Structure formats: C-alpha cells, structure tokens
Amino acid sequence: MIPCSLVTTCRNEMRSFARWKANMQAQTRFPDEVVIVDAFSDDGTWEALTDWAQEDSRIKVLQEKGAAAHGRNVAIQNAKYDHVISTDMGVRLEDCFCEEIMRPFDENPNLKLVIGSSYIDQKSITSIVAKTEKYINSAVVAKRKPGKSNGSLGGNRASAYTKSIWEECGRLPEDLTFYADDSTLFRQFRQAGYPYAYAPKAKVYWGRPAKLKQFWKEAFNYGRGDGEAAIKMSRTFKWYLMKKIPAWLEKWFNALRYTYKQFRFHAIINSLKEGDFGVMFVMPVLAFGIGWNQSVGYHRGYADGCVKCQACRARLEESKQNIAFDRRFTK
C-alpha cells in the first residue's frame, strides 16, 4: 500500500474532538501519519491533541496562527509522505474512509487526485429547517448515478492528492478571507488535467445548523469566498458587472433563481409521508434566504477581492477550462 499522511486543521474543537479521535481510531486503515495544525485553541483542544501525540507516535501536532488555508498548507508542508488525505475535524468519517480514499492510488499509482463523497449527518438534524434541507438534499442524491461526479470538483472535506500537484498549483490560496480556498485549488487540479478518480465509498458526514439565520450566514460566507476568488459567477452577476441591471435587482434574481432550483416536488411528498408538514412552508423561505444572502456575500466578496485577492484570481484568469467549469457547475 502507498503510505499516506492525513492532514487537517482545528480551533476550539473540544466538543467534537473525542468523537473525531474515536472515529479515526476505528478506521479500517489508519493513515501512516496524522498531521494536525491547531490555530491556538483556548478550550482545551491543544492539550488533548498533545496528549494524543504522546500516546501515538503517528500523530504530529503543530500550532500556527492564521486562517484554515494557511493551517492546511502548513500541515501538508510538514507531512512526511507525498500522498495526503484531506478532511475536517468537525466531520464524521465512515470507518472505511481512509482505506477507500487511498484505494484508487493503490490500484493506479499514476493517479494524482481522488475525490470522496460528502453527506449530511442525519444525527445533526434537530429542527424543521434542517429537516427541510435534508429532504431537498435527499431528492437531489436520489437522482445521482453511482460513480459519477455529480458536479463535485472536490474539496478539503473529503479528498486525497499528492504533495507534488499541491506544490505545482501554488498551494491553497491564503489571500481569501476564509472560504473558497479549496474550490480554487481543486479547479486548478482539474484544469491542469491531472489524472483523478472518484471514491464513492469514502464518505464523510457533516453537521448542519438548526436555525434559518445560521443557514443564511453560511450562505453569505460561502458567497463571500466565491466572490473574492471570482468563481461560480452567476449569469445575473455578469449582467450586473456589465451594468445591465442594478445590484439590488441582481440579488432578487439570484434569490428567485435559487428558490426555483431548490424546489423539489419529491422532497415535499417525502416530507408529507413522514408527517413533517412544515417543510412545504419552510422550503421557499429557506431557499430564498440562502439565495439572497449568497448574492449579498458574493457582492461583498467580489468588491473586496478586487483589492486583496488578485493573486488568487490570477490562478484562474484567461482559462478556457475555468469558463467551461463555471458554465457546467453554476447554472
């Protein structure tokens, strides 16, 4: 088997650390090394990490100030092996995650990138708002074809790649505020034509918020990151840039467009079967709010990115492949 290092970052993850540690220890294939960069936690996380490192020589822990992109770059820089598995500490991993994400490399040493699968953690669904997203997501997943990309470019949560392509593509961009660093890097991976594979059984499960405002804040942050990197640009935002429509109208268009895209008849039917009658009323409110806040965040991020994110944007500038990916994955 090809040796590998698992890399991740954290800050104040004490509430989820015990579960994540147990989750890692239950892996059918434990990584040859686990590199964790802590952003100076003050809730006991760092102490728990150092205790773990003393118990297990395969655990390497470091402290570094900065955003998640910087921390992950530091983790990869300090990884012993060329093949790195990337995930987040807050997620729940399938017991076979590491084994499955590395299996394609073992079968084909020429691969440079493997993309896993990400799902909503059903255990985190505690409100009608979270249930609404669950039904929408279930309707989308039901249409997926096994082994297909389903529009996923890959990301930090569930992937594995070689340090060589990470270095060749300039590492994770650190000039973004917090989000979209992996979206930028993985676009570069795919545009560069590196051989890759999907590992559908390499599953991670991520928790979801409980309140509408939390979903909307998340949408704003994702939109801000995409705007800073100038990726996933909607047609209506392009109209705004061409001064065909004002900013306020673009936000309305984006919100209505997102609401239309997220409306799933099967989601409503399934929710009614389960007795969750509130879903039909929450769905349009949730979707419209996400679309609106995503657009507000994108406007904010795009303006900020024109000043401080030129290095990140330059990675994808004048790229025909990037234009093709935007058309395929954002419309």
Image (cartoon, rainbow, N blue to C red):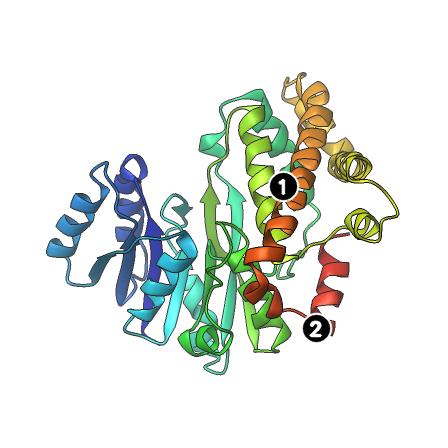
291 displayed left or right of 88: right
Cα gap from disc 2 to disc 1, whole angstroms: 24 Å
Labels 2 & 1 near each other (Cβ < 8 A): no
Three-letter amino acid code at the position of disc 2: Ser
Q: Bin the neighbour count of mark 1 within 10 Å (Cα to Cα): few under 14, some 14-19, many 20 and up.
A: many
Locate residue 330, reporting x and y percent.
73, 53
Question: Is residue 289 placed above or below 48 in the rendered structure?
Answer: above
Write down the residue under mark 2.
Answer: 319
Task: Out of 306 and 258, give the one closest to the viewer.
Answer: 306
Write down the residue under mark 1.
Answer: 297
Residue extending farthest right:
244
Locate residue 113, reporting x and y percent.
51, 71
Q: Is mark 1 on a helix, strand or loop?
A: helix
Residue 298 visible? The answer is yes
Three-letter amino acid code at the position of disc 1: Gly
Residue 98 visible? The answer is no
Locate residue 290, reporting x and y percent.
66, 34
Q: Bin the neighbour count of mark 2 within 10 Å (Cα to Cα): few under 14, some 14-19, many 20 and up.
A: few
